[in-house]
């Protein structure tokens, strides 16, 4: 991250900085998932040969978490986020979100902090990419009033459980819910009071 002046960030600047962190996190997760696969195949040998790689991955992940916390300190203390603007700003770094652009544009203001929504969108891009990419996004009737809900189908339906588990914490932080149903990831977000029902 650059040593930018302290203070509030625009959606574009926030998207750029979070996007760079998303790219960094994606690289670390790729290495860690590779080590996990090796551990499944040959636990004793893989553990011996990959111990330093695991330690470096954990250290790098802690560094990313610290950068996200520092970035949060620079965001505006607002209660709503323009999810459509954040999605557009993140697209160059998280192309997996392209399939969500139209759906998110239909309810751009979410009842959440910008950074929390950016984190959820970043995680959604990484999780769906890991599951082979988004094949379909369908609007479904929301469970809660003043909310939007989408069923997100991915190319590898067997990876939905892992994707949902990966998305639980970022979704909770953004005041959203995520669950699995019929081979799809279901994401529900609360709308801001000024967003149309």
Image: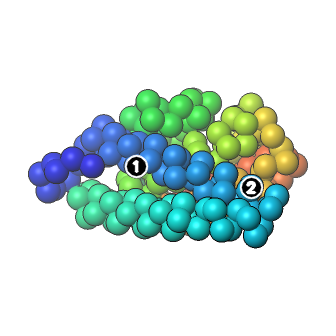
- Judging depth in this view, the residue of 157 and 42 nearest the camera is 42
**Which residue is tagged 1?**
21
**Residue shown at 53%/31% (left/top)?**
95
Mark 2 Cα-neighbour bin, 10 Å: few <14, some 14–19, many ≥20: few
Residue at left 41%, top 42%?
19
Q: Position of residue 72 (x, y in %)?
A: 31, 61
C-alpha separation, residue under disc 2 versus residue under disc 1: 24 Å
Residue 190, x across and y down, in percent: 55, 57
Depth check, mark 2 against mark 1: the one in front is: 2
Instruction: Report the side of 98 relative to 6 (left or right).
Output: right
Q: Secondary structure at mark 1?
A: helix
Question: Which residue was labeled with disc 2?
Answer: 37
186 sits left or right of 54 in the view: right
In the image: residue 53, left or right of residue 81? right
Q: Residues within 10 Å of mark 1 (few under 14, many from 20)?
A: many
Q: Locate residue 137: give its quadrant.
A: top right
| Residue at point 81%, 40% (across, down) | 156
* Residue 191 against residue 134 in the figure, above or below: below
Q: Is residue 110 visible?
A: no
Q: Is residue 44 above or below residue 83?
A: below
On screen, residue 48 above or below 25: below
């Amino acid at each position: 991250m650059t040593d930018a002046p302290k203070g509030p960030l625009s959606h574009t600047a926030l998207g750029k900085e979070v996007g760079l962190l998303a790219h960094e996190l994606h690289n670390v997760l790729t290495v860690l998932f590779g080590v996990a696969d090796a551990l499944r195949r040959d636990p004793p040998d893989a553990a011996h040969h990959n111990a330093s790689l695991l330690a470096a991955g954990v250290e790098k992940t802690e560094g990313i978490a610290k950068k996200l916390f520092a970035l949060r300190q620079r965001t505006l203390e607002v209660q709503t986020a323009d999810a459509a603007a954040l999605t557009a700003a993140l697209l160059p770094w998280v192309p997996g979100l392209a399939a969500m652009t139209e759906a998110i544009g239909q309810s751009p203001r979410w009842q959440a902090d910008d950074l929390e929504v950016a984190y959820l969108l970043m995680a959604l891009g990484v999780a769906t990419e890991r599951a082979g990419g988004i094949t379909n996004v369908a609007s479904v009737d929301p469970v809660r009033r003043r909310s939007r809900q989408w069923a997100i189908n991915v190319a590898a339906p067997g990876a939905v459980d892992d994707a949902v588990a990966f998305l639980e914490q970022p979704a909770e932080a953004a005041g959203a819910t995520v669950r699995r149903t019929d081979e799809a990831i279901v994401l529900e977000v609360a709308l801001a009071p000024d967003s149309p029902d």
